[in-house]
């Protein structure tokens, strides 16, 4: 039987392979960072390969309304969606794997849920009742999931057939308790035949002989079952494939069939994970559990395997070195979408990508003064690179080092891409060293600069941080009939890319800058806000005010990043 929520939804068409919405709920145990996001995304790929339209929901049990005000040091990158939602980086995984465009509603946080309930209580929606975690918070969570699951996300306007839900954190966390209870109830709300629970756990390897230990998994499944959820499938993370003895032991103690104990061992690349799961019968188990037909041929999965194997083949290919100059270089999650966009582009140019991370403070003599060896090493890496990337960021730390990187690329004909802040620092460098504007800077870093090359946007709030930037997808028309970026985008008249910034190139300086050869070939719909920058007479010196990495896909790399990789391997752009 298929149950529906008491909400208005667009019904699926008769051609759908399922009669109603199917839900796969991914939870995690033992510790965080096991790869629930990749597991959820990979399950989505298997569902999509079976012909289902798939969407995804990420639940983050923190009190923040969204990820927008979180430090990259603590939480990794903030992923930006079309509607301007600032969300957890796992939604980026979903979009890249499933080739969908999600909304801020697809990221549920404790802060959002409690805010909604409190607003309803203030309006009197609960008719004088005492508002409690059960049923009011848990009902809000369930209604949110079911509502969002029916929002079209793949561009064709049709309601999805399946929704993959990932619960952040680990089972047993205090902050996760309301969500676990809501998900327990949810299976009865929508019908148990329409829900599949997948639990991701850890099988550590101990001792000199590499014995696989099952006790952590036994305990986390016991905790989950004690909370009323019986997993239908266990995805066990381990360094090496599970041996049969381990699988049988997990099955016996965790109340799942041996075939439902899935080995998620280390893979050569993350694109092999869907193939790994499929080889162990996960797609078949999902079809049996959720009641959809698994086609005998799945062309999408075949194409995915070709792509994953191609990525492996590049291990023996010639290297291309991209120096990435930033301030969170010790934490790759802080630049996850940037890394993916570079990787996707390297697949197209058939090169093995090597990202040479350079801490921007080490390029500047003043900030690196106490460590001359690090200063020399940073410059050695920069000068040896085939291309240079300066990604986005906030704050003054490391700015002068980024400016020096842009100067080196401009003066020496090295392919360069500046993203968001990267465009701004390239503009500052040009104003200082080409136009001779003394102390040219951004008012973000020097409020008293006599030559503000970059200024605070007038419409942005100065009192509230969360959700007040220029956010989400905005159109950028091209101003020239022929330029590098327009060619890379396929000759279109405009592009729709995602933004996240508070500062912009000073409109009063644009004429002077362009007359010296740094052209803004794309501006916003008003024709005043600079969006795309190109330097005349340079192989590839490009900047974008938007973040093109957020829309990059494994088989459709972001055009600005692809241009950087092409120029870096000697292909004319």
Image: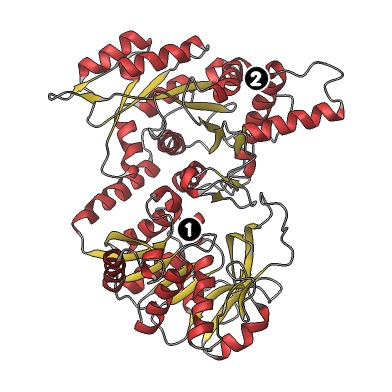
In the rendering, which numbered label is found on residue 549? 1
Q: Residue at x 20, y 60 (%)?
A: 317
Of badges 2 and 1, nearer the viewer stands 1
Quadrant in which the C terminus is drawn = bottom left
Give the SS element for disc 1. helix
Of all residues, the one furthest to the front in this rendering is 370
Pick the residue in front: 305 or 32. Answer: 32
Pick the residue in front: 78 or 183. Answer: 78
Quadrant in which the N terminus is drawn = top right
Residue 519 visible here:
yes
Give the SS element for disc 2. loop
Q: Give percent across and percent down for residue 299.
A: 38, 43
Q: Residue at x 86, y 18 (%)?
A: 128
Q: Residue at x 28, y 62 (%)?
A: 350
Circles 2 and 1: CB atoms closer than 8 Å: no
Q: Give percent across and percent down for residue 393.
A: 51, 60
Can you say whether 497 is above or below 505 in the image? above
Residue denoted by label 2: 3
Q: Give percent across and percent down for residue 124.
A: 87, 25
Residue 8 visible here:
no
Q: Residue at x 33, y 9 (%)?
A: 253
């Amino acid at each position: 039987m298929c149950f529906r929520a008491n909400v208005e939804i667009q019904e699926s068409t008769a051609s759908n392979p399922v009669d109603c919405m199917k839900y796969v709920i991914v939870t995690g145990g033992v510790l965080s960072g096991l790869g629930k996001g990749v597991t959820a995304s990979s399950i989505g790929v298997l569902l999509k390969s079976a012909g289902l339209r798939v969407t995804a929901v990420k639940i983050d049990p923190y009190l923040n309304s969204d990820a927008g005000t979180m430090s990259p040091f603590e939480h990794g990158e903030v992923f930006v969606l079309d509607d301007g939602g600032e969300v957890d980086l796992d939604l980026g995984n979903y979009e890249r794997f499933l080739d969908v465009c999600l909304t801020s509603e697809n990221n549920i946080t404790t802060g959002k849920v409690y805010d909604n309930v409190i607003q309803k209580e203030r309006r009197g929606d609960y008719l004088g009742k005492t508002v409690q975690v059960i049923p009011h918070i848990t009902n809000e969570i369930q209604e949110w999931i079911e509502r969002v699951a029916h929002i079209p996300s793949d561009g064709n306007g049709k309601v999805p057939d399946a929704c993959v839900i990932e619960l952040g954190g680990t089972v047993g966390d205090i902050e996760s308790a309301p969500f676990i209870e809501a998900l327990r109830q949810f299976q009865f709300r929508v019908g148990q035949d329409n829900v599949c629970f997948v639990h991701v756990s850890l099988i550590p390897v101990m001792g000199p002989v590499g014995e696989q230990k099952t006790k952590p998994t036994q305990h986390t499944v016991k905790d989950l079952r004690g909370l009323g959820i019986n997993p239908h499938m266990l995805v066990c993370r381990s360094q090496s494939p599970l041996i049969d003895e381990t699988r049988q032991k997990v099955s016996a103690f965790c109340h799942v069939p041996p075939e439902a104990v899935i080995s998620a061992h280390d893979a050569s690349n993350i694109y092999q994970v869907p193939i790994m799961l499929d080889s162990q019968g996960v797609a078949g188990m999902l079809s049996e559990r959720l009641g959809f037909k698994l086609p005998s041929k799945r062309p999408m999965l075949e194409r995915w395997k070709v792509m994953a194997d191609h990525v492996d083949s590049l291990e023996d290919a010639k290297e291309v070195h991209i120096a990435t100059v930033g301030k969170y270089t010790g934490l790759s999650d802080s630049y996850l979408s940037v890394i993916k966009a570079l990787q996707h582009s390297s697949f197209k140019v058939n090169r093995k990508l090597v990202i040479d991370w350079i801490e921007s403070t080490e390029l500047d003599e003043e900030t690196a003064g106490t460590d001359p060896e690090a200063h020399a090493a940073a410059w050695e890496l920069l000068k040896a690179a085939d291309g240079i990337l300066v990604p986005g960021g906030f704050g003054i730390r490391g700015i002068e080092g980024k400016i020096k990187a842009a100067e080196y690329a401009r003066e020496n004909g090295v392919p360069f891409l500046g993203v968001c802040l990267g465009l701004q620092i390239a503009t500052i460098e040009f104003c200082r060293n080409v136009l001779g504007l003394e102390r040219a800077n951004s008012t973000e870093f020097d409020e008293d600069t006599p030559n503000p090359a970059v200024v605070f946007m007038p419409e942005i709030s100065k009192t509230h941080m969360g959700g007040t930037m220029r956010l989400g997808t905005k159109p950028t028309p091209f101003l020239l009939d022929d330029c590098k970026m327009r060619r890379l985008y396929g000759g279109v008249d405009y592009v729709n890319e995602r933004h996240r910034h508070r500062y912009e190139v000073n409109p009063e300086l644009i004429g002077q800058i362009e007359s010296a050869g740094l052209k803004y070939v794309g501006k916003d719909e008003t024709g005043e806000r600079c969006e795309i920058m190109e330097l005349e007479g340079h192989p590839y010196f490009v900047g974008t005010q938007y973040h093109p990495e957020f829309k990059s896909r494994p088989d459709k790399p972001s055009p600005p990043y692809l241009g950087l990789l092409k120029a870096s391997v000697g292909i004319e752009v």
